[in-house]
Image (cartoon, rainbow, N blue to C red):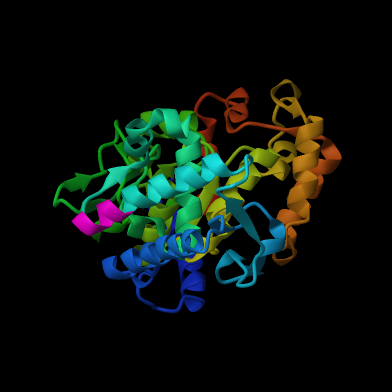
Amino acid sequence: MASRDVFAEIDKLRAQLLQNVEVTVDCQRAEEVSHLEVLKRIENIIQGIVASLSKDEAPVLVVPNRSSWANVSFDSAVGLQMSSGSSVITIRCDSALSTTKFARILKILMVIYRLVLSNSFATKRDIYYNNKQLFGSQKTVDGIVDDISCMLRVPRRSLHVLATSKGLISGDLCYLEEDGTRIDCRSSSTAVALSSNIAGIRNIVSSAKFVMIVEKDATFQRLLHDDFCTKLSPCIIITGKGFPDVNSRLMVRKLWDTLHIPILTLVDADPHGIEIMCIYKYGSVAMSFEARSLTVPSVMWLGLLPSDLQRLRVPEDSLIRLTKRDESKLNSLLKRPYLTRHPDWQKEMELMQQSKVKAEIQSLAAIGPDYLTNIYLPNKLRYGGWI
């Protein structure tokens, strides 16, 4: 396949996308909060606790409810974002149900204060191992750091708390990390682990025509093995290894802000894969308070489409019946506020609902061992087979 055939359609898509792009300052930089402001907001919380104690009252912490759809509004240019009048969760120090969480939040606030004051950084894993007995699990620390970010109304990077990245990236891309390390992602055999500090990445250089988000690590590794980026160079592929972590989402957003090239997704033809794609595009309820730096509403669905299963006559023994849980997830997705803007997505999901089957990307191997990289993706890209 001639690369120019592929890029003719990709270039058309890019031109269409750029018509709707306002050239603005990178959202990640624009939303940075100064060290002094972060310190001030933490001090205000502590002063409130001291004031309550001085009145012989039980101190409380008020945290926006990050798990309620009622607290989220939809903006087509941003995605799911937390509403200004969102409901809150009150955490009391005199309640048996919340005393431990109260103590955990105060402990992490103290750690953050010291980090910001000294202009140093720590990972969430560092915080957990600093007091395993208090926190109980890494997941507890992860949730509290996000609660604090939401409570203080500052991006998590402004808290000087980093998360270990699980994502990988490869393709026509070079950049500098904050410490000056030069990262070259152009190796065709190995991928680069995403940085823990995406905000610090600078001097991005790329001739890529598109970015492709790959849901699963197994598929990503197959594309590497088949030299996909070399054959279709220039392009970039990235995976969050399933449900994406914040750093994977930040990196996709940073590539969009910097390069303004099409972002395509390759996910399983199942409700879980569709939800992952929607998270990259429009965000999640839990992180809706930081939507502007995490979402890319221009993301397109390249595959695997439910209609592809019929069109390509994927063997029936490669298809999987939807479970009750799958059907429930699919029904939930169809009610999401952004689906009304995507009738083609609705049709695909309704087709899945009717057929009651799903399929993994690997099911294409039943047609031919190299079908994904040599036929399916090249044809999709050549003929604009995204929605």
Start-end of magenta stretch:
113-118
- The spot of residue 382 in percent (x, y) is 51, 52
Chief SS of the magenta region:
helix
In the rendering, at what x and y percent does residue 239 appear?
44, 41
Q: Is residue 226 magenta?
A: no
Q: Is 148 displayed left or right of 233 in the figure?
A: right
Q: Nearer the viewer, residue 175 or 368?
A: 175
Q: Which of 134 and 77 lies nearest the eye of the viewer? A: 134
Q: Is residue 98 above or below residue 132?
A: below
Q: Vertical placement of 342 versus 18: above or below?
A: above
The x and y percentages for residue 213 are 48, 46
| Image x and y of residue 54, in percent | 46, 62
Q: Which residue of the protein is positioned furthest toward the right in this rendering?
A: 354
Total of numbered circles in the picture?
0
**Residue 213 in sight in this render:** no
Q: Tell me the residue at 66%/44% (across/down).
A: 305
- Point out the image quarter for the N terminus: top left
| Side of 179 relative to 295 (left or right) | left
Residue 47: tell me if it is visible: yes
Q: Quadrant of the C terminus?
A: bottom right
Q: Name the residue nearer the viewer: 51 or 334.
A: 51
Residue 33's quadrant in the figure? bottom left
Q: Is residue 375 left or right of residue 122?
A: right
Quarter of the image for residue 304 reads top right
State the residue at coordinates (46%, 48%).
105
